[in-house]
Structures are given as C-alpha cells and as structure tokens.
C-alpha cells in the first residue's frame, strides 16, 4: 500500500496545507497521508516556533475525523532536532517493506535538500512527490541532482524520474493557494481576521490560546 508524508512546522496549519494533502491522496491513490509536525525544526532557528503541543493540536483539529489524513506526533516523542531521515526510517520500519512511502515536498524545499541530515540516504527510503511552486521548474532538478552526484534515469514521462535506488521522483501539480503561515501570524499580531485562511476550529484555538499576539 502507499502512504504519504507531509511534514512541516505547521505554525499554524492552514487551508493550503490541507488542500495539498487532500489532492495528493487522490492523485497518488494513497491509503493514508500522515501530517507530521516538526517538534524542533532544524531549519527554523531564525524565529521562535510555537510550542509543539499547540502545533500538534491545531493539526489534529484541522483534519477532524478524516479517513484519509492522520496526524502523527512521532517527532514530538524524540529529543533534539527533528530530522526527516530519522522520521522516515522509523515510519518505514513500522509500516514494513511491503508498503511504500511517498514524501510530499514543494519544489522549493527540494532544492534545499543538500542541507538536510544524511540527504543521500533519503532516496533509499522514500519516493519523492515534488509539488509545483511559483518560480520553480521540475526540469531544474536535473542539474541539481548532477551537482549532488545522485544518479537517475529520465523516463518518457517528463514528470517521472527513476533514481538509482529504485525510488521515484514524481512531479505533481496542486492548487496554489496564496496562503502562508507567516502571513497568518502577522495578521493575528495586527488584530486582523484570519477567517477562511485556516479551519474555523483552528482559528478559535489560536484566539483562545493567545497564539501569535
């Protein structure tokens, strides 16, 4: 079976995250997609991040009783920075070799993968689903992969690349919503409405807990 993974700081989770998750479940035929809040994001050191329990709760509220989406607190149970390679290996082990992982990542984020811990090992653990982002082209991954020394084979499908490890890089298009967690936090700080940017129950939680003020 196929299982998707969408990680992030989710500070806060918003409708753009949820729409991408929903569309990838349908595009890939996933049995389930796991939303995984990062407990201690190694690349978010430039600003304070809301406490993990708040970000976890908002993600849980956001998906409600969804059959296809599930929030995992796997990174909250570990000490230290949240590294994707550790999370992916843990999930791969728990799901078993008969199941495949599909790591959903924006094209912009993929071009930062050389800064990740043991990034070469990621290509032996999971398939990558690279979602379109404004200003980025899927074809630009080829010179990037070359610079990293990663071997691959192009296929007749321009949106599919087979890595030497046997894992796939898949290019998928999702609805681009002009929403960002940064903008939402700024709106709250300025006392402006965030309705229709986040689910109503997430908005209520933000106001009740005094987040981002």
Image (cartoon, helix red, strand yellow):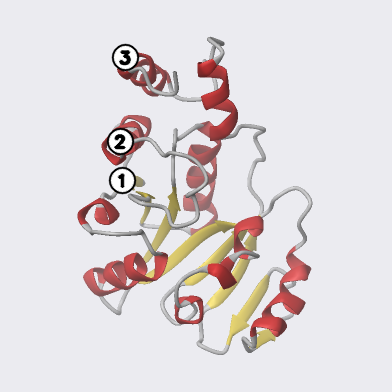
Give the position of the N terminus as an image quadrant.
bottom left
Residue on which the image places disc 1: 71
Left or right side of 180 for 139: right
Residue at x 65%, y 65% (from the top left corner): 111
Comparing 34 with 51, the one in front is: 51
Left or right side of 61 for 103: right
Residue at x 46%, y 65% (from the top left corner): 102
Give the image location of residue 87, x and y in percent. Answer: 33, 65
Question: Would you call the spot at circle 1 few (<14 residues within 10 Å), some (14-19), or many (20 or more)?
Answer: many
Dot 3 or dot 2, earlier in sequence: 2
Comparing 71 with 27, the one in front is: 71
* Disc 1 from disc 2: Cα separation: 6 Å
Q: Is residue 61 above or below residue 56?
A: above
Question: Would you call the spot at circle 3 few (<14 residues within 10 Å), some (14-19), or many (20 or more)?
Answer: few
User: What is the number of callouts on the image?
Assistant: 3
Dot 1 or dot 2, earlier in sequence: 2
Residue on which the image places disc 3: 208
SS for callout 2: helix
Residue on which the image places disc 2: 60
């Amino acid at each position: 079976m196929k299982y998707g993974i969408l990680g992030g700081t989710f500070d806060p989770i918003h409708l753009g995250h949820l729409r991408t998750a929903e569309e990838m479940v349908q595009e890939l035929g996933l049995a389930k997609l796991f939303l995984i809040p990062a407990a201690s994001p190694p690349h978010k050191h430039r600003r304070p991040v809301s406490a993990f329990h708040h970000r976890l709760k908002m993600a849980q509220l956001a998906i409600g009783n969804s059959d296809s989406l599930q929030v995992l607190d796997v990174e909250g149970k570990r000490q230290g920075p949240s590294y994707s390679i550790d999370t992916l290996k843990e999930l791969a082990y728990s799901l078993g070799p008969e199941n495949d992982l599909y790591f959903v990542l924006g094209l912009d984020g993929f071009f930062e993968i050389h800064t990740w811990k043991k990034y070469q090992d990621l290509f032996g653990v999971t398939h990558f689903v690279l979602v379109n982002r404004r200003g980025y082209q899927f074809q630009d991954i080829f010179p990037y992969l070359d610079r990293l020394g990663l071997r691959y084979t192009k296929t007749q499908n321009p949106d599919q690349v087979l890595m030497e490890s046997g894992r796939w890089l898949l290019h998928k298009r999702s609805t681009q919503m002009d929403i960002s967690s940064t903008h939402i936090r700024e709106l709250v700080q300025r006392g402006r409405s965030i309705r229709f940017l986040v689910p109503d129950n997430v908005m209520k939680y933000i106001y009740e807990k005094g987040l981002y003020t």
